[in-house]
Amino acid sequence: MRSALLAVLLAFSSAALPQSADVGLVNLVSGDVSYASSSGPPAKVQAFMKVRDGDRFNLAAGAQIRVVFFEGARQERWLGPATFQATKGASTPITGNPAEVATLPAGVQQRIARVPELMQSARLGGIQVRGGITQRQKASLDQQETISAARETYAKMRTDMPADDITPELYLYAALYEFFMFADMKPVVTEMLRRQPESEDLKLLDAWVTTRLSK
């Protein structure tokens, strides 16, 4: 009886443990890259997955990963062999060469933080837009100003970022999604695919946007 009670108490205790905070997003991964959270076994890193505080990453020789941190708009690029641990706003090197660091424009990280949700929506075939809003909806003047500012930020990032870095496109995609501007999102996804043609996630995203345009 005592052992059964202890097992129940342990189960409740484990369930009550707070989940580590989301601190970033993987926006590029190639080669053999794995990670381990503070409470789980090692697993393969997937593109566009969230990074949590305390996640430890291991890169084999020749592998690479890019992580955007939500706090401070910091982006890091790691090349293997290397090991590092993600923390709030940055990573802590363990082995290997230090990360290449880029600073993103202010406000970019808030939209980048939505990317995993948007990717998951595409994987699941999308959701019904509440209220019947379609891609034919016209943006208000305020919305137009918001999108104009987002396009300016995108243009600046595109000039500063490497050719295979789609962070600028992810940012603009998320901004356009806020107003369900699917017709404008289509060329952004096309550009992402041009830069990363092997990405299965981007192919799904492209197919999902295409279906939105047909509704």
Image (cartoon, rainbow, N blue to C red):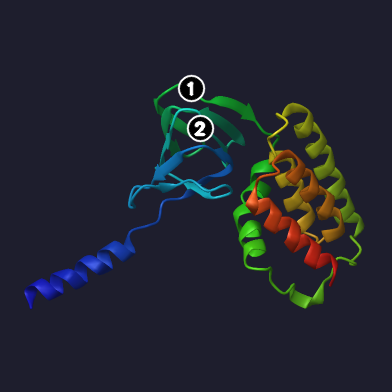
Mark 2 falls on what kind of element?
A: loop
For this orientation, the residue located farthest to the left is 2
Q: Residue at x 60, y 54 (%)?
A: 116
Please state which amino acid type lies under the numbered disc 1. Pro
CA separation, marks 1 and 2? 14 Å
Q: Residue at x 61, y 49 (%)?
A: 113
Residue occupied by mark 2: 63
Towards the viewer: 17 or 215:
215
Please state which amino acid type lies under the numbered disc 2. Ala
For this orientation, the residue located farthest to the top is 97
Return the x and y of residue 24 as percentages of the image width and height: 54, 44
Return the x and y of residue 156 as percentages of the image width and height: 79, 32
Residue occupied by mark 1: 98
In the displayed structure image, the side of residue 13 where residue 128 appears, left or right: right
Look at the image and tell me whether residue 107 can be seen.
Answer: no
Mark 1 falls on what kind of element?
A: loop
- Identify whether 138 is placed above or below 115: below
Q: Which quadrant, please, contains the C terminus?
A: bottom right
Look at the image and tell me whether residue 169 can be seen.
Answer: yes
Residue 79 circle label:
none
Towards the viewer: 131 or 202:
202
Return the x and y of residue 82 as percentages of the image width and height: 43, 28
In the displayed structure image, the side of residue 182 where residue 4 appears, left or right: left
Q: Residue at x 50, y 28 (%)?
A: 62
Q: Classify 10 Å Cα crowding around label 1: few (below 14), some (14-19), many (20 and above).
A: some
- Identify whether 34 is placed above or below 12: above
State which tag comes first along the sequence, 1 or 2: 2
Q: Classify 10 Å Cα crowding around label 2: few (below 14), some (14-19), many (20 and above).
A: some
In the displayed structure image, the side of residue 56 where residue 139 appears, left or right: right
